[in-house]
Amino acid sequence: MSNPKFTERLSVGFTPDQVRRLDEIARVRARKGEPLSKADIVRASVEFYLLHQEDLSGSRKAIVKAVEGKIAEVDTKLDHLDTKMTTFIEWFQARMRK
């Protein structure tokens, strides 16, 4: 019986070495009490890959890149504000000395 949330099917070819490694992961997980099919492992791998693509909207990597950009903008504005405040304080102190 298929899982209703998996409605799309793809056919993917693997090398014998890739299948061997998938089998090994499945065996290790089964021994740890976390039985997974090769399909489960491939789905988890694809999900991990997609989450780490910075050019894929909504991925963690894209979100991190956007947040880093916003932080850089704020840093630039704070540096500018700091320069203006320092200039103002110097002007004000000079004015008070007169």
Image (tube, grey):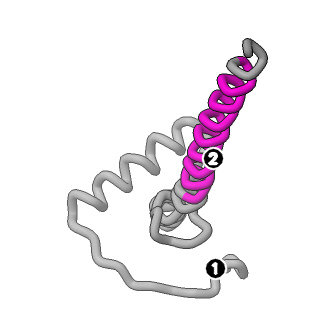
Crowd around label 1: few <14 · some 14–19 · many ≥20 (10 Å) = few
Which label was assigned to residue 44? none
Magenta region: 66-93
Q: Tell me: residue 61, above or below residue 92.
A: below
Rendered residue at 72%/81% (across/down): 4
Furthest toward the top, the residue is 97
Quarter of the rendering occupied by the N terminus: bottom right
Helix, strand or loop at label 2? It is helix
Rendered residue at 64%/79% (across/down): 6
Q: Tell me: residue 41, above or below residue 4.
A: above
Closer-to-camera residue (31/94):
94
Residue 47: horizontal and vertical position, in percent?
53, 63
Whether residue 61 is in magenta: the answer is no
Residue at mark 1 to residue at mark 2: CA–CA distance: 47 Å
Quarter of the rendering occupied by the C terminus: top right
Side of 28 where 92 appears, left or right: right
Q: Which residue is mark 2?
A: 77
